[in-house]
Image: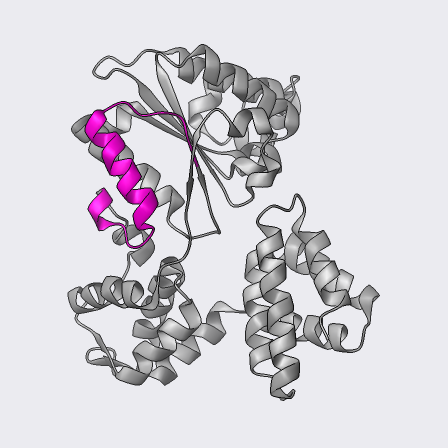
């Protein structure tokens, strides 16, 4: 129980990945040709984009996997900035200091230098290497323009994989440089087929009600299902035998420490108290680090569990689903959330 199950059961091969059959089958055909283009993987958080990128590199390079794959998280560069750069040992030689206050160049300049250096080094045991940039929506316009030129310049030595939950934040010239593959959450049956072997391997099993509760809460999000299962297993009074619906619900409460904030957001929407709603949205996005999609998912739960008439609940659920759709191409989730709250009830 010491290992985090999302890490312990991370897919090693393409066949281990659940769901997203069209994108996965496309990547399998590309693997057979050994001619990998630049890729842009887009879809909601925890839909399997990063797992797919790592599994792809593992199958492509085998035992040389670690030497031919370089991983960067764009949010580390541009959200944390120089504080992150001095903590990553890979950048020590380029930066030349461990004190962020002594870094005289901009984060953008450092980013370009780092990507240029890694992309320009030809691999010894492969035709090309892979640079995987996660959370690519955190790249600003200048860094995207620089990345576009680097992708063009070093095609012979390097392939780029970009992962994003907000493809609209990528400039069109960058989007046009890669094959775009779409990811989404898995179906109920796919989730069950993925979770049950893991539960058996851990020596536990679900009651029918427990499995139904897990599926209802996870809604196809495998990472959420794994975390919830592990927490339920830890808390279960009968954790050597069965996971009940009560165990699942208790673990859910532990995983949503800001549930009261979501309910306050819902109440503000009902009362048309837009100023209060905007403050709560800011707190959820900035202070608590929730994504726009996560806020929508929790708001959906609150709406469904409300005592409003069925017709009113259906109207609010439709508004939430519309916002979920628009958020996929939105540059700022805050704007979409505020628009939703203004016309939710």
| Foreground of the two, 91 or 160 | 160
334 lies left or right of 55: right
**Image quadrant where residue 66 sits:** top left
- What range is drawn magenta here? 14-40
179 lies left or right of 59: right
| Foreground of the two, 321 or 66 | 321
320 lies left or right of 116: right
Q: Which quarter of the rendered picture does the N terminus lie within? A: bottom left
Q: What's the image's color scheme?
A: one colour
> Total of numbered circles in the picture?
0
Residue 14, percent from left and from top: 24, 43
Residue 186 visible in rendering: yes
Residue 282, percent from left and from top: 72, 56
Residue 94 visible in rendering: no
**Image quadrant where residue 51 sits:** top left
Q: Which quarter of the rendered picture does the C terminus lie within? A: bottom right
Residue 158, percent from left and from top: 37, 18
| Foreground of the two, 137 or 202 | 137
Residue 151, percent from left and from top: 46, 18
Is-magenta flag for residue 26? yes
Is-magenta flag for residue 228? no
Q: Which residue shows up at 47% across the image and 72% down it? A: 254
Does residue 278 sit above or below 75 in this rendering? Answer: below
Q: Which residue shows up at 62% across the image and 80% down it? A: 313
Does residue 77 sit above or below 110 in this rendering? Answer: below
Q: Which residue shows up at 32% across the image and 84% down it? A: 209
């Amino acid at each position: 129980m010491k290992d985090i199950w999302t890490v312990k059961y991370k897919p090693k091969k393409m066949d281990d990945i659940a769901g997203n059959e069209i994108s996965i089958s496309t990547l399998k055909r590309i693997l057979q040709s050994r001619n990998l283009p630049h890729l842009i993987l887009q879809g909601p958080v925890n839909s399997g984009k990063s797992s797919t990128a790592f599994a792809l590199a593992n199958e492509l390079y085998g035992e040389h996997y670690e030497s031919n794959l370089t991983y960067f998280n764009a949010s580390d560069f541009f959200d944390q900035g120089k504080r992150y750069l001095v903590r990553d040992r890979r950048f020590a030689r380029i930066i030349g200091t461990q004190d962020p206050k002594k870094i005289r160049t901009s984060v953008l300049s450092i980013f370009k230098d780092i990507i240029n250096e890694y992309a320009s080094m030809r691999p010894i045991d492969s035709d090309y290497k892979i640079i995987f940039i996660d959370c690519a929506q955190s790249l600003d316009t200048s860094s995207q323009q620089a990345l576009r030129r680097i992708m063009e310049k070093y095609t012979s030595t390097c392939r780029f994989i970009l992962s994003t939950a907000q493809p609209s934040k990528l400039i069109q010239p960058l989007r046009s440089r890669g094959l775009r593959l779409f990811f989404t959450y898995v179906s109920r049956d796919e989730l069950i087929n993925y979770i049950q072997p893991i539960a058996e391997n851990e020596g536990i099993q679900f009651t029918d009600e427990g499995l139904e509760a897990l599926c209802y809460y996870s809604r196809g999000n495998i990472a959420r299902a794994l975390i919830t299962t592990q927490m339920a297993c830890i808390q279960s009074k009968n954790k050597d035998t069965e996971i009940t619906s009560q165990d699942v619900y208790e673990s859910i409460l532990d995983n949503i420490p800001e549930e009261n904030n979501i309910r306050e957001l819902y109440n503000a929407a009902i009362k048309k108290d837009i100023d209060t709603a905007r403050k709560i949205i800011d707190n959820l996005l900035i202070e608590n680090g929730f994504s726009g999609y996560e806020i929508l998912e929790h708001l959906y739960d609150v709406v469904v569990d409300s005592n409003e008439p069925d017709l009113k609940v259906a109207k609010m659920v439709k508004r939430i689903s519309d916002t979920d759709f628009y958020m996929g191409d939105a540059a700022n989730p805050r704007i979409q959330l505020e628009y939703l709250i203004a016309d939710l009830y």
